[in-house]
Amino acid sequence: MARRLDGATAVVVFLLIVVPSFMLYFVTAQKSPPFHIDPFTNVATSWNLSTHGTVYLQEHAEFVGPEYFRTVGWFVEAPDGTVAQYPPGAALWALPFYLVSSADIEIVPGIPENNRDLGVINLPVPPLTPAAAAASLAVALAIGFLGLTIREVASNRHAVAVAYIFGFGTTAWAVASDQLWQHGPAMMWLALGTYLASRASRWGAGLAFGAALLTRPLTAVMAATSGLAQGWRERSVKPVVQIGAGAALGLAALLAYNYVLFDSASVSGGYGDIFANRTRNADVWWFLGNVFGGLVNPVRGLLVWSPFLVVLIPGLRAAWKAAPAWARGPAIGGVVYLLVHWKANRFSGGDGFFGYRYPLEALVAAAPFLYYSYREWVAGRLVARKVFRYTVVVAVGLQAGVVLL
């Protein structure tokens, strides 16, 4: 079987990753209330686009008042009506799934967990199955593109193994594929961008990074570091221009979207200035504590929920020497992305889910580089290989426990 796998084409490897993972993701995804308010906000936008052809949330306009803030959704008042505070990328990704769905909106009574003083409210809830399918497919495609990227520098066996370790040993399973968060589509576009960069298809890589930017704007740092790393390696501005041009289209689309909705061509859009102000905060000790919590907090810690990453740390220096520029660049961007997140926001990422979520985009961007850490340091050491395998089993077990129990 191993020999047959190593002789398989790229299409076969891609399907061996995407099809089974999508099926498992979709079976275990959330398709009915209760739901998290973050992905629900994307659901409301996507359903309105498919039903009314607009991002203005007619059925949810009454939930924009201060008493509903952070209770049923992240809805804000724009000059022309109620909209989601989020960029449109995740909602646009789910739009085709809602266009083929025949289910209608349903009024669901419930008491908001974040503000139980409101009592029972009747919330219009669009069908959640299309959102579950969209989220599941986005993450399945993300690990599929990751597998193809690893296949550029390793065997098919390693490509499939890396894809499944990432897909089921991180919260890509327990969080990103479970509901229509922004993480799944952003991971998918980042993984596609890195794969295209590995094949020197830089115009396409830039467009993929631009789509990620339209989903989670801070992913622009991955596009920047990818282009800069390849430009530095080649001593040429050509990779910077090629990748930057595609990413700039995503930025232009985001600015135009925010200008139409909020009368301001800004990156922050419905978020306002809150995260920018936190980033400028000079409280170094709070930041260091936030980083520490993001890494080892028992409930949200990256290294707690994906402990195999600890085994890869000693090999980072060797990986830096061996990895090509297209793998180094996104990895640097992933570190910057995560540090900015931990500077601008609490490491927990809120409540209502298990494990971490902010590191997901950083992980998918750094995954090819981390593979070099495995290849250059772990693979040649018997004890390290055994510890790595045991920690992978622990990570997958944690995800499975969250999803299945």
Image: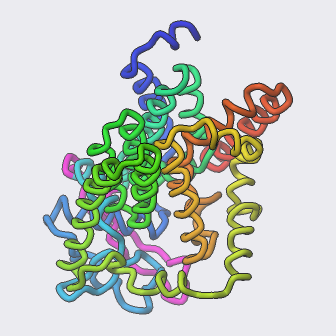
Q: Is residue 397 above or below residue 108?
A: above
Q: Is residue 17 above or below residue 362?
A: above
What is the span of residues highlighted in magenta in the rendered image?
A: 99-127
Residue at 63% across, 43% down? 320
In this view of the protein, which residue sits in the foreground, 160 or 370? 370
User: Within the image, what quadrant is residue 48 found in?
Assistant: bottom left
- The x, y position of residue 11, in whole percent, is 36, 22
Residue at 81% across, 35% down? 387
Q: Is residue 245 visible?
A: yes
User: Within the image, what quadrant is residue 347 found in?
Assistant: bottom right
Q: Which residue lies furthest to the front in this view?
A: 235
Magenta run includes residue 120: yes
- The x, y position of residue 318, in whole percent, is 69, 39
- The x, y position of residue 322, in whole percent, is 61, 35
Residue at 51% across, 13% down? 5
Residue at 47% across, 10% down? 7
Magenta run includes residue 156: no
